[in-house]
Image (cartoon, coloured by chain):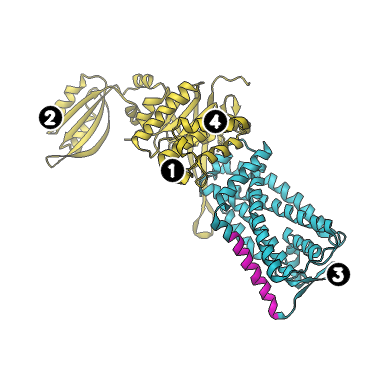
Chain colours: A cyan, B yellow
Amino acid sequence: MFLRTVLAEARKNIKQYFFTARALFWALALPLGNGLYLYFLYLPFGSRTVNLEFTSRVFTLDLAGFTLIGQLLYSFFTMMLLAGVAFDAERWQGTLESVLLSPANRIAILLGMALANTLSYVWLLMGVMFSWVMFLNVSVVISDLPALLASVLLSYLSLVALGMSLEAFCIHSRRAHMYVNMLQEPIMFLSGLIFPLQSMPEALLPISYLLPLTFGLISVRLTLLGGASIFDVAIPLTILGIMIIIFTASAVWLVGYAERNAKAKATLTQF
Amino acid sequence: MRGYSSAVEARELSRDYISARRNRFVGRKRTTVVKALDNVSFEIQEGELFGLLGPNGAGKTTTVKILCTLLEPTGGHAFVKGYDVVKEAKHVRSIVNMVAGGERMLYYRLTGRENLTYFADLYDVPRKEVSSRVNKLLELVGLSERGNDEVEKYSKGMKQRLQICRGLINDPEVLFLDEPTLGLDVNIAKDIRRFIREEIVREQGKTVLLTTHYMYEAEEMCDRVGFLNNGRLVAVGQPEELKRKTPSGFSVELMVIRLTDDAFEGLKLLKNVTKVIATEYVGETEGEKIDRLIINVESDKAVPAVLDYMSAKHCRVVSVNLRGPTLEDLFMFYTGET
């Protein structure tokens, strides 16, 4: 029943939010435009490479690849934020009660929402990567394929786990979408998406290290563009693994707490 | 199967809504408590169609939401088929469903068929049965031909019929219907009432709790009714039994021209008149306004005295209608609403 609920929820959300030509167009156009903006921001400085310092080593990465990975991971992060807001949409369209009226597993519902956004992300991913590789000539340096795959997988799972926590938070709070939207810009800045982490003011670094996006960016950029091995990215991968456990556990706890709390305070339908 | 005496049982059910508001951004929060339900107890038997009646804000929807696990009570207990709606909520959810009035609880960008299939998955309806059950339900409510259209293209009545299909998708043992005909055309509402009474209750033998503030609807459909007023259950029983028990006896409906306040107040003091429930403006004749009075009298012998009194007060009675009490009279008697 768990898997059936996941797939049903995913199908519903894809049909609701992504299955129109207009939605597909904008899912592709917006991140593409945003990524190009980042790329061209660097060009006046005259360098086609970016130095990324990590654990006392300096990796020289291709600029186009640096911005590409940044944009792709950020787009996925945004997709997970949107998955979070999906529960809020259920509330305002009056369907949250009909979902919670069923005996379906709540975690399966959260996963289904995240899966729908993942599938639509694949479309975005293909489109953006094609454009980048075709027009910007990304220079890829892979020396450890398992390290790259582990980086992509753990980054993906950590962001899904974060998205599930946000979804559960949306059952709890009627203002959750506002908080979720407020997260976007600061995280874009703090995660090292636009510029390497070593350029960040030291006072802000502790906050950066709380974000799964930060470690996802480091590990994927280094393994895809810098030829890093599994040992070079062992620390970010371990932290991502810990974050997956923490965010999944918080989603499981929060969804139960949020539902009980909403039923106690009668906030399932009211705004 | 757990032993139980009633399909649905509410024991001293209470629900408070608490809202806290801070005055001008700072300062202490002011807390307001609204008692939506106050020690409500009732039972619904297997296969019974029970009507919960009351004016807006009486606590009908709150009761339904508690019974189908969407809201927690602040006091008391409730059981569905012997399962506690708070402690065994997951089990209760698998044997109940709820249909609300209005146009909520459906996905507008999905087709009718997709909506039903989605909910069938959530309720883990056996895969082999999903397609046939969806087709059967769509056919039952006359939506077979529109099943593949997006719900946003449906009329209000069609959406409501699809909602009923959604409510039946898990073949629930107990169905909660919260104002299912709210805002519908007369003919569509009549079809839906017939469907609930004939198909859901008589044919399928399901237990149904219906909330409504349309008295004719309750009179036409319900085996037993309960009157909720200000969160309290003020009467429960079969409509005929309540009519007999209620001191409203007979009702005299008068259409009166030139009714004065003095005459209206004096009516209440007449012998054998138990209650003058309402006076409302209903229209005009020959340039004069007509008021409608419903007067509860202990026996039909009081009618001549009432007419004599109206004549003595120079009020012109244009029509007299003597009838036994209706649910509407009971509603007004128990709730004080007109």
Residue A191: horizontal and vertical position, in percent? 72, 64
Mark 4 touches mark 2? (CB < 8 Å): no
Q: Nearer the viewer, mark 4 or mark 3?
A: 4
Name which residue type carries label 4. Arg
- Which residue has dot 1 on it? B154
Residue at 43 percent across and 25 percent down: it is B197
Q: Which contiguous range is marked in magenta?
A: A26-44
Chain letter of mark 2 equals B
- Which residue has dot 4 on it? B133
Residue B152 horizontal side relative to residue B296, left or right = right
- Which is more toward the observer, A150 or A81? A150
- Which is more toward the observer, B103 or B159? B159
N-terminal of the pair, mark 1 or mark 2, is 1
A32 magenta-colored: yes
Residue A49: horizontal and vertical position, in percent? 77, 74
- Which residue has dot 3 on it? A57
Instruction: Tell me the CA gap for discs 2 and 3.
Output: 107 Å
Chain letter of mark 4 equals B
N-terminal of the pair, mark 4 or mark 2, is 4
Residue A239 horizontal side relative to residue B272, left or right = right
Name which residue type carries label 1. Tyr
Residue that sits furthest to the right in the current view: A231
Instruction: Tell me the CA gap for discs 1 and 2.
Output: 55 Å
State whether discs 1 and 4 lie on one chain: yes
- Which residue has dot 2 on it? B311
Instruction: Tell me the CA gap for discs 3 and 1.
Output: 63 Å
Residue at 61 percent across and 45 percent down: it is A11
| Secondary element type, mark 2 | helix
